[in-house]
Image: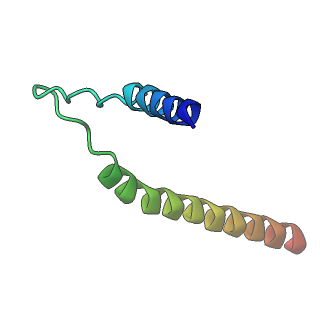
Amino acid sequence: MRILILSTSLLATVLLSACQRPPAPNPEKPPVPQAMARAMHEPLDRAKSTQKTVEDAAAHERKAEADATQ
């Protein structure tokens, strides 16, 4: 029983000493907010990708129509 108590307290001490406080942020240089930029750019990137797909499909259709008329 004594070994169990000793090992449990030793394990708790090791685990608690392994936990460290995160470093304090630099007050002169605030962190860059990335969530807002990501929230703004994701829909724009999706829209650009969709626009490219639509333009490629239209070009393919125009080419197929031009080939059919010749």
- The quarter of the picture where the N terminus appears is top right
Image colouring: rainbow
Image point (74%, 69%), residue name: 62
Image point (29%, 30%), residue name: 21
Comparing 12 with 5, the one in front is 5
Tell me where residue 60 appears, x and y as whole percent: 76, 64
Seen in the picture, residue 35 relative to 57 is either above or below; the reply is: above
Tell me where residue 44 appears, x and y as whole percent: 43, 59
Q: With 61 as the anchor, is 14 left or right in this view?
A: left
Q: With 28 as the anchor, is 2 left or right in this view?
A: right
Q: Quadrant of residue 55?
A: bottom right
Q: Residue furthest left?
A: 28
Tell me where residue 6 appears, x and y as whole percent: 50, 29
Q: Quadrant of residue 18?
A: top left
Comparing 48 with 55, the one in front is 48
Seen in the picture, residue 53 relative to 24 is either above or below; the reply is: below
Image point (39%, 52%), residue name: 38
Comparing 4 with 47, the one in front is 4
